[in-house]
Amino acid sequence: MNRYETILRDVAEFLAANYDITLQSLAPEATLEDLGFDSLGMFSVMTLLENKHGLRFEGTMLAGLRTVGDLLALLRAQSSVA
Amino acid sequence: MRERQRVGITALGLVTPLGIGTDVTWQRLTEGASGVRRLTLFDASASRVQIAAEVAEFEPRRFLDFKDTQRLARVGQLAVAAAELALGSGALTGLDREEIGTIVSSGLGGPDAIFSGVRAHLDGQAVSPLFIPMAMTNLAASLIAHRFELQGPSYSPVSACASSADAIGQGYRLIRDGYAGACVVGGAEGPINPVVMSSFASMRALSRHNDEPERAARPFAADRDGFVLGEGACVLLLESFESALRRGARILAEVAGYGQTSDAGHLTAPRPEGDRVARAMTLALREAELAAGDVDYVNAHGTGTLLSDPAETRAIHLALGEHARRVAVSSTKSMLGHLLGAAGAVEAAICALSIEHGVIPPTINLETPDPVCDLDYVPNVSRRRTVNVALTNSQAFGGHNVTLVLRRPRVPEATH
Protein backbone atom coordinates (compact mmCIF):
# COMPACT_ATOMS: atom_id res chain seq x y z
CA MET A 1 0.00 0.00 0.00
CA ASN A 2 1.54 3.33 -0.99
CA ARG A 3 1.28 6.49 1.09
CA TYR A 4 -1.75 7.85 -0.75
CA GLU A 5 -3.59 4.57 -0.30
CA THR A 6 -2.80 4.50 3.42
CA ILE A 7 -4.05 8.06 3.80
CA LEU A 8 -7.18 7.24 1.83
CA ARG A 9 -7.83 4.22 4.04
CA ASP A 10 -7.57 6.42 7.17
CA VAL A 11 -9.91 9.00 5.69
CA ALA A 12 -12.38 6.27 4.76
CA GLU A 13 -12.26 4.90 8.31
CA PHE A 14 -12.81 8.37 9.75
CA LEU A 15 -15.79 9.03 7.51
CA ALA A 16 -17.34 5.67 8.36
CA ALA A 17 -16.83 6.05 12.11
CA ASN A 18 -17.91 9.68 12.43
CA TYR A 19 -20.28 10.31 9.55
CA ASP A 20 -21.57 6.89 8.57
CA ILE A 21 -20.27 7.62 5.06
CA THR A 22 -18.71 4.97 2.81
CA LEU A 23 -16.04 6.78 0.81
CA GLN A 24 -15.82 4.08 -1.86
CA SER A 25 -19.48 4.51 -2.70
CA LEU A 26 -19.20 8.22 -3.44
CA ALA A 27 -19.11 9.77 -6.88
CA PRO A 28 -16.30 12.33 -7.30
CA GLU A 29 -18.84 15.03 -8.09
CA ALA A 30 -20.80 14.49 -4.83
CA THR A 31 -20.56 17.65 -2.74
CA LEU A 32 -19.18 17.51 0.78
CA GLU A 33 -22.01 19.73 2.00
CA ASP A 34 -24.62 17.23 0.81
CA LEU A 35 -22.82 14.56 2.84
CA GLY A 36 -23.21 16.67 6.00
CA PHE A 37 -19.44 17.08 6.01
CA ASP A 38 -19.06 20.63 7.26
CA SER A 39 -15.97 22.72 7.95
CA LEU A 40 -15.54 21.20 11.43
CA GLY A 41 -15.58 17.74 9.87
CA MET A 42 -13.00 18.85 7.32
CA PHE A 43 -10.77 20.32 10.04
CA SER A 44 -11.17 17.10 12.04
CA VAL A 45 -9.96 14.91 9.20
CA MET A 46 -7.07 17.26 8.46
CA THR A 47 -6.03 17.16 12.12
CA LEU A 48 -6.11 13.38 12.01
CA LEU A 49 -3.85 13.32 8.93
CA GLU A 50 -1.50 15.87 10.45
CA ASN A 51 -1.18 13.76 13.58
CA LYS A 52 -0.83 10.44 11.85
CA HIS A 53 1.02 11.21 8.65
CA GLY A 54 2.72 14.52 9.30
CA LEU A 55 0.83 16.24 6.47
CA ARG A 56 0.36 19.99 6.65
CA PHE A 57 -2.80 21.72 5.43
CA GLU A 58 -3.05 25.49 5.15
CA GLY A 59 -6.45 27.13 5.54
CA THR A 60 -6.19 28.42 1.99
CA MET A 61 -6.00 24.84 0.64
CA LEU A 62 -9.38 24.08 2.13
CA ALA A 63 -11.18 27.15 0.85
CA GLY A 64 -11.95 25.75 -2.61
CA LEU A 65 -12.92 22.23 -1.55
CA ARG A 66 -16.43 21.50 -2.68
CA THR A 67 -16.66 17.93 -3.90
CA VAL A 68 -15.33 14.51 -3.00
CA GLY A 69 -13.15 14.75 -6.12
CA ASP A 70 -11.62 18.02 -4.83
CA LEU A 71 -10.83 16.32 -1.53
CA LEU A 72 -9.21 13.28 -3.18
CA ALA A 73 -7.11 15.53 -5.41
CA LEU A 74 -5.89 17.48 -2.41
CA LEU A 75 -5.03 14.30 -0.53
CA ARG A 76 -3.14 12.93 -3.55
CA ALA A 77 -1.17 16.17 -3.90
CA GLN A 78 -0.32 16.35 -0.21
CA SER A 79 0.62 12.69 0.03
CA SER A 80 3.38 13.24 -2.51
CA VAL A 81 4.86 16.15 -0.52
CA ALA A 82 7.64 15.01 1.78
CA MET B 1 -42.15 51.32 27.01
CA ARG B 2 -44.48 48.34 26.83
CA GLU B 3 -46.46 47.32 29.82
CA ARG B 4 -44.82 44.51 31.80
CA GLN B 5 -45.85 41.11 30.51
CA ARG B 6 -46.85 38.19 32.70
CA VAL B 7 -44.79 35.10 31.85
CA GLY B 8 -45.90 31.48 31.78
CA ILE B 9 -44.40 28.06 31.13
CA THR B 10 -46.16 26.48 28.14
CA ALA B 11 -43.96 23.44 27.43
CA LEU B 12 -41.30 21.45 29.20
CA GLY B 13 -39.01 18.51 28.52
CA LEU B 14 -37.05 16.51 31.06
CA VAL B 15 -34.19 14.07 30.59
CA THR B 16 -33.17 12.90 34.04
CA PRO B 17 -31.73 9.95 35.95
CA LEU B 18 -35.34 8.94 36.63
CA GLY B 19 -36.28 8.74 32.99
CA ILE B 20 -36.40 10.22 29.53
CA GLY B 21 -39.53 12.33 29.46
CA THR B 22 -41.59 14.47 31.77
CA ASP B 23 -44.30 11.94 32.64
CA VAL B 24 -41.93 9.14 33.61
CA THR B 25 -39.71 11.47 35.63
CA TRP B 26 -42.68 12.92 37.48
CA GLN B 27 -44.21 9.50 38.11
CA ARG B 28 -41.00 8.16 39.61
CA LEU B 29 -40.39 11.32 41.64
CA THR B 30 -43.79 11.01 43.26
CA GLU B 31 -43.08 7.33 43.98
CA GLY B 32 -39.93 8.31 45.83
CA ALA B 33 -37.68 6.37 43.45
CA SER B 34 -33.92 6.83 43.30
CA GLY B 35 -31.99 7.41 40.08
CA VAL B 36 -28.64 6.71 41.72
CA ARG B 37 -26.72 3.61 40.56
CA ARG B 38 -23.23 2.18 40.31
CA LEU B 39 -21.35 4.15 37.66
CA THR B 40 -21.36 2.81 34.11
CA LEU B 41 -20.12 5.75 32.01
CA PHE B 42 -16.50 5.03 32.92
CA ASP B 43 -14.61 2.41 34.89
CA ALA B 44 -14.73 3.70 38.45
CA SER B 45 -13.53 0.52 40.13
CA ALA B 46 -10.44 2.28 41.49
CA SER B 47 -12.22 5.55 42.33
CA ARG B 48 -13.18 6.80 45.77
CA VAL B 49 -16.70 7.45 44.50
CA GLN B 50 -18.30 4.74 42.37
CA ILE B 51 -21.90 5.92 42.18
CA ALA B 52 -23.73 8.55 40.16
CA ALA B 53 -27.16 9.49 38.86
CA GLU B 54 -26.78 8.67 35.18
CA VAL B 55 -29.46 8.99 32.51
CA ALA B 56 -29.83 5.25 32.02
CA GLU B 57 -30.78 3.84 28.64
CA PHE B 58 -30.13 7.14 26.89
CA GLU B 59 -30.09 6.44 23.15
CA PRO B 60 -28.69 9.53 21.43
CA ARG B 61 -29.72 8.19 18.01
CA ARG B 62 -33.36 8.76 18.97
CA PHE B 63 -32.72 12.50 18.99
CA LEU B 64 -29.62 13.09 16.87
CA ASP B 65 -28.26 12.22 13.46
CA PHE B 66 -25.29 9.87 13.37
CA LYS B 67 -22.70 12.65 13.00
CA ASP B 68 -23.93 14.40 16.14
CA THR B 69 -23.99 11.19 18.19
CA GLN B 70 -20.28 10.86 17.39
CA ARG B 71 -19.17 14.41 17.94
CA LEU B 72 -21.39 16.21 20.44
CA ALA B 73 -20.25 16.36 24.05
CA ARG B 74 -22.65 14.53 26.36
CA VAL B 75 -24.05 17.84 27.65
CA GLY B 76 -25.09 18.74 24.09
CA GLN B 77 -26.74 15.40 23.46
CA LEU B 78 -28.77 15.63 26.67
CA ALA B 79 -29.74 19.24 25.90
CA VAL B 80 -31.00 18.45 22.41
CA ALA B 81 -32.98 15.48 23.74
CA ALA B 82 -34.73 17.65 26.35
CA ALA B 83 -35.41 20.35 23.75
CA GLU B 84 -36.86 17.78 21.35
CA LEU B 85 -39.14 16.46 24.11
CA ALA B 86 -40.26 19.98 25.02
CA LEU B 87 -40.63 21.49 21.57
CA GLY B 88 -40.65 18.65 19.05
CA SER B 89 -44.39 18.09 18.92
CA GLY B 90 -45.47 21.47 17.64
CA ALA B 91 -45.03 23.47 20.84
CA LEU B 92 -43.75 26.45 18.83
CA THR B 93 -46.68 26.59 16.40
CA GLY B 94 -47.92 30.15 15.98
CA LEU B 95 -44.79 31.76 17.43
CA ASP B 96 -42.49 33.98 15.37
CA ARG B 97 -39.06 32.39 15.56
CA GLU B 98 -37.36 35.76 15.09
CA GLU B 99 -38.82 36.73 18.45
CA ILE B 100 -37.83 33.61 20.41
CA GLY B 101 -34.76 33.76 22.66
CA THR B 102 -32.68 30.76 23.73
CA ILE B 103 -31.24 31.04 27.22
CA VAL B 104 -29.91 27.61 28.15
CA SER B 105 -27.04 27.05 30.56
CA SER B 106 -24.61 24.52 31.78
CA GLY B 107 -22.23 24.94 34.67
CA LEU B 108 -19.28 23.04 33.25
CA GLY B 109 -19.71 22.81 29.49
CA GLY B 110 -18.15 19.67 28.02
CA PRO B 111 -15.62 18.18 30.42
CA ASP B 112 -15.49 15.01 28.28
CA ALA B 113 -14.23 17.14 25.36
CA ILE B 114 -11.70 18.87 27.61
CA PHE B 115 -10.51 15.50 28.88
CA SER B 116 -9.87 14.10 25.38
CA GLY B 117 -8.30 17.35 24.16
CA VAL B 118 -5.84 17.49 27.04
CA ARG B 119 -4.98 13.83 26.56
CA ALA B 120 -4.25 14.39 22.84
CA HIS B 121 -2.08 17.39 23.68
CA LEU B 122 -0.09 15.47 26.30
CA ASP B 123 0.42 12.71 23.75
CA GLY B 124 2.07 15.26 21.47
CA GLN B 125 -0.87 15.38 19.02
CA ALA B 126 -2.65 18.34 17.47
CA VAL B 127 -5.94 18.84 19.35
CA SER B 128 -9.26 18.23 17.61
CA PRO B 129 -10.97 21.33 16.18
CA LEU B 130 -14.05 20.13 18.06
CA PHE B 131 -12.36 20.73 21.42
CA ILE B 132 -13.41 24.40 21.66
CA PRO B 133 -17.04 24.14 20.43
CA MET B 134 -17.65 21.02 22.52
CA ALA B 135 -16.06 22.44 25.66
CA MET B 136 -17.86 25.78 25.63
CA THR B 137 -20.58 26.29 28.23
CA ASN B 138 -22.93 27.83 25.65
CA LEU B 139 -23.00 24.66 23.51
CA ALA B 140 -26.52 23.71 24.61
CA ALA B 141 -28.01 27.13 23.83
CA SER B 142 -26.32 27.18 20.44
CA LEU B 143 -27.47 23.68 19.45
CA ILE B 144 -31.07 24.34 20.46
CA ALA B 145 -31.25 27.71 18.71
CA HIS B 146 -29.85 26.11 15.55
CA ARG B 147 -32.14 23.08 15.64
CA PHE B 148 -35.34 25.10 16.10
CA GLU B 149 -34.21 28.19 14.15
CA LEU B 150 -34.68 30.46 17.14
CA GLN B 151 -33.27 33.84 16.19
CA GLY B 152 -33.81 36.01 19.25
CA PRO B 153 -31.32 36.72 22.05
CA SER B 154 -29.25 33.67 22.90
CA TYR B 155 -26.68 33.09 25.62
CA SER B 156 -25.88 30.99 28.67
CA PRO B 157 -25.59 32.60 32.07
CA VAL B 158 -23.01 30.69 34.08
CA SER B 159 -23.26 30.62 37.86
CA ALA B 160 -22.21 27.02 38.63
CA CYS B 161 -25.11 25.19 40.26
CA ALA B 162 -27.43 28.19 39.88
CA SER B 163 -26.81 28.51 36.13
CA SER B 164 -30.11 27.25 34.80
CA ALA B 165 -32.12 28.99 37.53
CA ASP B 166 -30.50 32.14 36.19
CA ALA B 167 -31.32 31.05 32.62
CA ILE B 168 -35.00 30.89 33.56
CA GLY B 169 -34.79 34.19 35.41
CA GLN B 170 -33.08 35.91 32.48
CA GLY B 171 -35.56 34.52 29.95
CA TYR B 172 -38.44 35.56 32.18
CA ARG B 173 -37.14 39.13 32.34
CA LEU B 174 -36.57 39.32 28.56
CA ILE B 175 -40.22 38.47 28.01
CA ARG B 176 -41.58 40.48 30.92
CA ASP B 177 -39.80 43.61 29.69
CA GLY B 178 -40.67 43.13 26.02
CA TYR B 179 -37.27 42.12 24.58
CA ALA B 180 -38.53 38.70 23.42
CA GLY B 181 -41.96 37.25 22.79
CA ALA B 182 -40.95 33.83 24.05
CA CYS B 183 -37.80 32.16 25.31
CA VAL B 184 -36.59 28.60 25.33
CA VAL B 185 -34.82 28.32 28.67
CA GLY B 186 -33.22 25.65 30.78
CA GLY B 187 -30.04 23.81 31.51
CA ALA B 188 -28.05 20.72 30.72
CA GLU B 189 -25.09 19.02 32.34
CA GLY B 190 -22.98 16.01 31.43
CA PRO B 191 -20.41 16.02 34.23
CA ILE B 192 -19.92 12.30 34.85
CA ASN B 193 -16.28 12.15 34.00
CA PRO B 194 -13.33 10.84 36.05
CA VAL B 195 -11.61 14.23 36.30
CA VAL B 196 -14.71 16.11 37.45
CA MET B 197 -15.64 13.41 39.94
CA SER B 198 -12.15 13.18 41.35
CA SER B 199 -12.08 16.91 42.06
CA PHE B 200 -15.50 16.88 43.76
CA ALA B 201 -14.40 13.82 45.74
CA SER B 202 -11.23 15.62 46.86
CA MET B 203 -13.44 18.47 48.06
CA ARG B 204 -15.29 15.91 50.19
CA ALA B 205 -18.46 17.04 48.42
CA LEU B 206 -19.59 13.61 47.18
CA SER B 207 -21.27 10.81 49.08
CA ARG B 208 -19.16 7.68 49.39
CA HIS B 209 -21.98 5.29 50.14
CA ASN B 210 -20.81 3.13 47.24
CA ASP B 211 -22.47 0.00 48.59
CA GLU B 212 -25.98 1.41 48.75
CA PRO B 213 -26.34 3.79 45.80
CA GLU B 214 -30.08 4.32 46.12
CA ARG B 215 -29.66 5.40 49.73
CA ALA B 216 -26.58 7.55 49.17
CA ALA B 217 -28.23 10.95 48.68
CA ARG B 218 -29.60 11.92 52.09
CA PRO B 219 -30.35 15.64 52.23
CA PHE B 220 -31.16 16.98 55.70
CA ALA B 221 -30.42 13.58 57.33
CA ALA B 222 -28.10 13.27 60.29
CA ASP B 223 -25.97 10.70 58.44
CA ARG B 224 -25.61 12.59 55.12
CA ASP B 225 -22.11 12.64 53.68
CA GLY B 226 -22.39 14.67 50.48
CA PHE B 227 -24.23 14.85 47.20
CA VAL B 228 -24.40 12.37 44.34
CA LEU B 229 -23.30 13.72 40.98
CA GLY B 230 -26.01 13.56 38.33
CA GLU B 231 -26.51 14.35 34.65
CA GLY B 232 -29.49 15.42 32.60
CA ALA B 233 -31.28 18.34 31.05
CA CYS B 234 -34.45 20.36 31.26
CA VAL B 235 -35.80 22.69 28.61
CA LEU B 236 -38.87 24.89 29.09
CA LEU B 237 -40.76 27.24 26.84
CA LEU B 238 -41.60 30.57 28.46
CA GLU B 239 -43.90 33.07 26.81
CA SER B 240 -46.04 36.03 27.67
CA PHE B 241 -49.59 35.32 28.81
CA GLU B 242 -50.70 37.46 25.90
CA SER B 243 -48.92 35.17 23.44
CA ALA B 244 -50.12 31.96 25.09
CA LEU B 245 -53.73 33.14 25.12
CA ARG B 246 -53.54 34.31 21.52
CA ARG B 247 -52.38 30.91 20.24
CA GLY B 248 -54.33 28.81 22.73
CA ALA B 249 -51.29 27.37 24.52
CA ARG B 250 -51.93 25.98 27.96
CA ILE B 251 -49.99 27.71 30.76
CA LEU B 252 -48.64 25.16 33.24
CA ALA B 253 -47.42 27.74 35.72
CA GLU B 254 -46.53 31.40 35.92
CA VAL B 255 -42.93 32.47 36.54
CA ALA B 256 -43.70 35.27 38.96
CA GLY B 257 -40.48 36.24 40.71
CA TYR B 258 -36.71 36.01 40.48
CA GLY B 259 -34.28 36.94 43.25
CA GLN B 260 -30.50 36.89 43.15
CA THR B 261 -27.87 37.60 45.77
CA SER B 262 -24.22 36.81 46.35
CA ASP B 263 -22.69 35.39 49.50
CA ALA B 264 -19.66 37.54 48.66
CA GLY B 265 -17.65 35.13 50.71
CA HIS B 266 -16.00 31.74 50.35
CA LEU B 267 -15.35 30.22 46.93
CA THR B 268 -17.14 26.97 47.72
CA ALA B 269 -18.51 26.94 51.28
CA PRO B 270 -21.99 28.39 51.85
CA ARG B 271 -22.39 31.26 54.29
CA PRO B 272 -23.52 29.48 57.47
CA GLU B 273 -25.92 32.27 58.51
CA GLY B 274 -28.08 31.72 55.40
CA ASP B 275 -29.01 35.39 55.40
CA ARG B 276 -28.06 36.03 51.78
CA VAL B 277 -29.97 33.01 50.54
CA ALA B 278 -32.90 34.32 52.60
CA ARG B 279 -32.61 37.68 50.89
CA ALA B 280 -32.78 36.04 47.45
CA MET B 281 -35.99 34.33 48.57
CA THR B 282 -37.42 37.58 49.90
CA LEU B 283 -36.54 39.50 46.73
CA ALA B 284 -38.20 36.85 44.57
CA LEU B 285 -41.36 36.89 46.69
CA ARG B 286 -41.45 40.67 46.62
CA GLU B 287 -41.19 40.69 42.83
CA ALA B 288 -44.06 38.20 42.71
CA GLU B 289 -46.06 40.45 45.08
CA LEU B 290 -46.51 37.53 47.43
CA ALA B 291 -46.06 37.19 51.18
CA ALA B 292 -44.18 34.47 53.04
CA GLY B 293 -47.49 32.98 54.15
CA ASP B 294 -48.54 32.40 50.52
CA VAL B 295 -45.81 29.81 49.89
CA ASP B 296 -47.05 26.20 49.77
CA TYR B 297 -43.89 24.42 48.69
CA VAL B 298 -40.16 25.09 48.70
CA ASN B 299 -38.05 22.90 46.43
CA ALA B 300 -34.82 23.27 48.36
CA HIS B 301 -31.34 23.28 46.88
CA GLY B 302 -30.79 20.53 49.50
CA THR B 303 -27.60 18.96 48.22
CA GLY B 304 -26.93 16.74 51.22
CA THR B 305 -23.53 18.21 52.03
CA LEU B 306 -22.64 18.81 55.66
CA LEU B 307 -22.57 22.60 55.42
CA SER B 308 -25.22 23.40 52.85
CA ASP B 309 -28.37 21.84 54.37
CA PRO B 310 -28.20 23.65 57.75
CA ALA B 311 -27.40 26.96 56.04
CA GLU B 312 -30.39 26.62 53.72
CA THR B 313 -32.62 25.59 56.62
CA ARG B 314 -31.64 28.81 58.41
CA ALA B 315 -32.33 30.76 55.23
CA ILE B 316 -35.84 29.34 54.97
CA HIS B 317 -36.50 30.28 58.61
CA LEU B 318 -35.21 33.80 58.00
CA ALA B 319 -37.18 34.34 54.80
CA LEU B 320 -40.48 32.78 55.80
CA GLY B 321 -40.53 33.46 59.57
CA GLU B 322 -43.25 31.58 61.46
CA HIS B 323 -44.60 30.17 58.20
CA ALA B 324 -41.36 28.16 57.78
CA ARG B 325 -42.71 25.64 60.29
CA ARG B 326 -45.82 25.04 58.20
CA VAL B 327 -44.41 25.06 54.67
CA ALA B 328 -43.55 21.83 52.85
CA VAL B 329 -39.88 21.68 51.85
CA SER B 330 -38.28 18.90 49.86
CA SER B 331 -35.02 18.08 48.17
CA THR B 332 -35.57 16.17 44.96
CA LYS B 333 -31.79 15.78 44.75
CA SER B 334 -32.35 12.87 47.13
CA MET B 335 -33.74 11.05 44.06
CA LEU B 336 -32.14 12.77 41.05
CA GLY B 337 -28.68 13.50 42.40
CA HIS B 338 -27.19 16.91 41.77
CA LEU B 339 -27.37 17.98 38.13
CA LEU B 340 -25.17 21.05 38.79
CA GLY B 341 -25.94 23.66 36.12
CA ALA B 342 -29.10 21.80 35.07
CA ALA B 343 -30.46 21.48 38.61
CA GLY B 344 -32.22 24.84 38.79
CA ALA B 345 -34.25 24.23 35.65
CA VAL B 346 -35.15 20.66 36.61
CA GLU B 347 -36.30 21.85 40.01
CA ALA B 348 -38.31 24.74 38.57
CA ALA B 349 -40.01 22.19 36.30
CA ILE B 350 -40.76 20.06 39.37
CA CYS B 351 -42.37 23.10 41.01
CA ALA B 352 -44.54 23.63 37.91
CA LEU B 353 -45.55 19.96 37.97
CA SER B 354 -46.36 20.09 41.68
CA ILE B 355 -48.67 23.02 40.96
CA GLU B 356 -50.27 21.16 38.06
CA HIS B 357 -50.75 17.81 39.84
CA GLY B 358 -51.23 18.90 43.44
CA VAL B 359 -48.51 16.53 44.66
CA ILE B 360 -45.29 17.39 46.48
CA PRO B 361 -42.43 14.97 45.81
CA PRO B 362 -40.59 13.78 48.90
CA THR B 363 -37.09 13.94 50.33
CA ILE B 364 -36.11 10.28 50.34
CA ASN B 365 -33.56 8.59 52.60
CA LEU B 366 -34.62 10.83 55.45
CA GLU B 367 -34.86 8.38 58.35
CA THR B 368 -33.15 10.45 61.05
CA PRO B 369 -33.15 14.20 60.41
CA ASP B 370 -30.22 16.28 61.52
CA PRO B 371 -31.48 18.13 64.65
CA VAL B 372 -30.42 21.48 63.16
CA CYS B 373 -32.52 20.71 60.07
CA ASP B 374 -35.91 21.22 61.68
CA LEU B 375 -38.37 21.86 58.85
CA ASP B 376 -41.05 19.67 57.29
CA TYR B 377 -38.99 18.01 54.54
CA VAL B 378 -41.83 15.75 53.30
CA PRO B 379 -39.83 12.69 54.37
CA ASN B 380 -39.79 9.59 52.15
CA VAL B 381 -43.36 9.70 50.83
CA SER B 382 -44.90 12.23 48.47
CA ARG B 383 -47.81 14.32 49.71
CA ARG B 384 -51.05 15.27 48.01
CA ARG B 385 -51.63 18.96 48.56
CA THR B 386 -52.84 21.91 46.54
CA VAL B 387 -49.86 23.99 45.55
CA ASN B 388 -50.61 27.52 44.44
CA VAL B 389 -47.19 28.99 45.06
CA ALA B 390 -43.89 27.14 44.86
CA LEU B 391 -40.44 28.47 45.32
CA THR B 392 -37.17 26.91 44.22
CA ASN B 393 -33.74 27.72 45.64
CA SER B 394 -30.37 27.33 43.99
CA GLN B 395 -27.07 27.98 45.76
CA ALA B 396 -23.83 27.66 43.88
CA PHE B 397 -20.11 27.40 44.27
CA GLY B 398 -18.99 30.99 43.93
CA GLY B 399 -21.67 32.16 46.34
CA HIS B 400 -24.45 32.71 43.78
CA ASN B 401 -27.92 32.44 45.31
CA VAL B 402 -31.00 32.34 43.10
CA THR B 403 -34.67 31.88 43.95
CA LEU B 404 -37.51 31.54 41.48
CA VAL B 405 -41.19 31.85 42.39
CA LEU B 406 -43.74 29.88 40.39
CA ARG B 407 -47.47 30.18 40.87
CA ARG B 408 -50.70 28.81 39.53
CA PRO B 409 -51.63 30.90 36.48
CA ARG B 410 -54.40 33.35 37.32
CA VAL B 411 -55.95 33.73 33.90
CA PRO B 412 -59.19 31.70 33.81
CA GLU B 413 -58.93 30.99 30.05
CA ALA B 414 -55.45 29.66 30.59
CA THR B 415 -56.37 26.97 33.05
CA HIS B 416 -58.76 24.95 30.89
Image (cartoon, coloured by chain):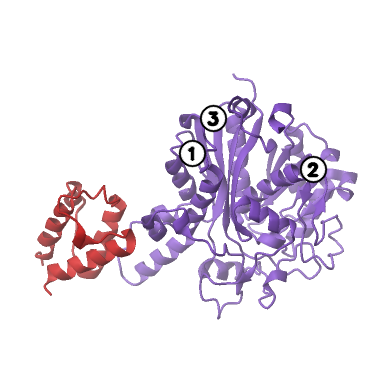
Chain colours: A red, B purple
Q: Which sits earlier in the primary sequence, circle 3 or circle 2? A: 3
Q: Do the residues labelled 3 and 2 touch (CB within 8 Å)?
A: no
Q: State the image quarter where residue B323 is shown.
A: top right
Q: State the image quarter where residue B335 is shown.
A: bottom right
User: Helix, strand or loop at disc 2?
Assistant: loop
Give the letter of the chain under mark 2: B
Q: Name the residue under label 2.
A: B387
Density class for disc 2 (Cα within 10 Å; few <14, some 14-19, many ≥20) is many
Same subunit under labels 1 and 2? yes
Q: Distance between the residues labelled 1 and 3?
A: 11 Å
Q: Where is residue B230 in the image (x, y as percent from the top left)?
A: 60, 62
| Apparent side of residue B416 relative to residue B47 in the rendered image (left or right) | right
Task: Locate the N terminus of chain B by quadrant.
Answer: top right
Label 1 amino acid? Answer: Ser
Give the letter of the chain under mark 3: B
Q: Position of residue B315 (x, y in %)?
A: 79, 50
Give the letter of the chain under mark 1: B
From this viewpoint, is residue B306 visible? yes
Q: Are marks 1 and 3 in contact (CB under 8 Å)?
A: no
Disc marking residue B180: 3
Which residue is depicted at the point 63% across and 70% down?
B37
Q: Do the residues labelled 1 and 2 touch (CB within 8 Å)?
A: no
User: Helix, strand or loop at disc 3?
Assistant: loop
Q: Which sits earlier in the primary sequence, circle 1 or circle 2? A: 1
Which marked residue is nearer to the observer: mark 1 or mark 2? 2
Disc marking residue B154: 1
The one nearer the camera, B181 or B32, is: B32
From this viewpoint, is residue B128 visible? no
Q: Where is residue B318 in the image (x, y as percent from the top left)?
A: 83, 47
